[in-house]
Image (cartoon, grey):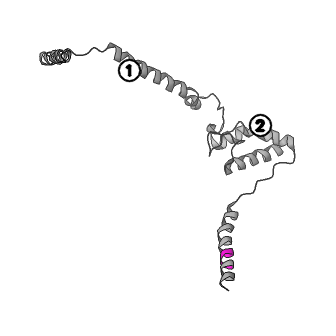
């Protein structure tokens, strides 16, 4: 009787633990049956940055938002929109940051020139620091310091 109770208890416990985990699992959305359409989706998805991962394209990302954006690209392509229209739509909706190659505009100037300006500033700081090191001369010793140094040097010479 106790063994049967333990079997049922463990079964219920196992279900109680596994069912919520299974409920959270996501099923993969089916891709388009058309391989040509899917290839076009991936070409456009390679041009867009995942807003969750930020260092991946939405083609490579498995984030929920990236999956949704790929589905949106797929549906827009099925509606007859061009790749440029889709990229413009995404840029309007999420800003130029979503584009891996943002357009050259006054508001994206920092995106394009920022890394070069930061590198130039770092080189300037390093050259100033190294140059200041080479130009500096030590301050002359006071008479007390000179006497102490002479005494230490003369003591050093004796065994």
| Residue 63 left/right relative to 138 | right
Residue positioned 69% across, 79% down in the render = 8
Q: Residue at x 75, y 57 (%)?
A: 27
> Which residue is identified by label 2?
43
Q: Nearer the viewer, residue 143 or 66?
A: 143
Is residue 51 shown left or right of residue 87?
left
Image position of 152 with respect to 90: above or below: above
Contact, CB < 8 Å: mark 1 with mark 2? no
Magenta-colored span: 8-12
Q: Which mark is residue 129?
A: 1
83 falls in the magenta region: no
From the viewer's side, name the closer residue of 144 and 25: 144
Going by the picture, which residue comes out furthest to the front? 159
Local secondary structure at mark 1? helix
Q: Work out whether residue 32 can be spotted.
A: yes
Tell me residue 110's x, y (percent). 55, 30
Give the total of numbered labels. 2
Would you say the magenta stretch is mainly helix, strand or loop?
helix
Give the x, y percent position of residue 121: 46, 23
* Residue drawn at (70%, 59%) of the image: 25
Would you call the spot at circle 1 few (<14 residues within 10 Å), some (14-19), or many (20 or more)?
A: few
Residue drawn at point x = 67 percent, y = 49 percent? 65
- Rendered location of residue 94, percent (x, y): 64, 43
For mark 2, give the secondary structure.
helix
Direction bottom: furthest residue = 1
């Amino acid at each position: 009787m106790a063994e049967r109770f333990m079997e049922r208890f463990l079964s219920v416990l196992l279900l109680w633990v596994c069912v919520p985990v299974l409920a959270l699992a996501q099923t993969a959305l089916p891709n388009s049956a058309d391989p040509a359409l899917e290839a076009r989706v991936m070409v456009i998805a390679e041009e867009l940055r995942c807003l969750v991962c930020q260092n991946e394209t939405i083609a490579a990302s498995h984030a929920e938002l990236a999956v949704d954006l790929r589905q949106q690209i797929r549906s827009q392509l099925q509606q007859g929109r061009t790749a440029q229209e889709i990229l413009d739509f995404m840029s309007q909706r999420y800003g130029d940051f979503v584009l891996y190659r943002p357009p050259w505009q006054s508001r994206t100037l920092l995106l394009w020139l920022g890394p070069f300006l930061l590198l130039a500033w770092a080189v300037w700081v390093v050259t100033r620091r190294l140059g200041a090191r080479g130009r500096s001369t030590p301050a002359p010793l006071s008479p007390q310091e000179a006497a102490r140094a002479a005494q230490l040097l003369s003591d050093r010479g004796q065994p």
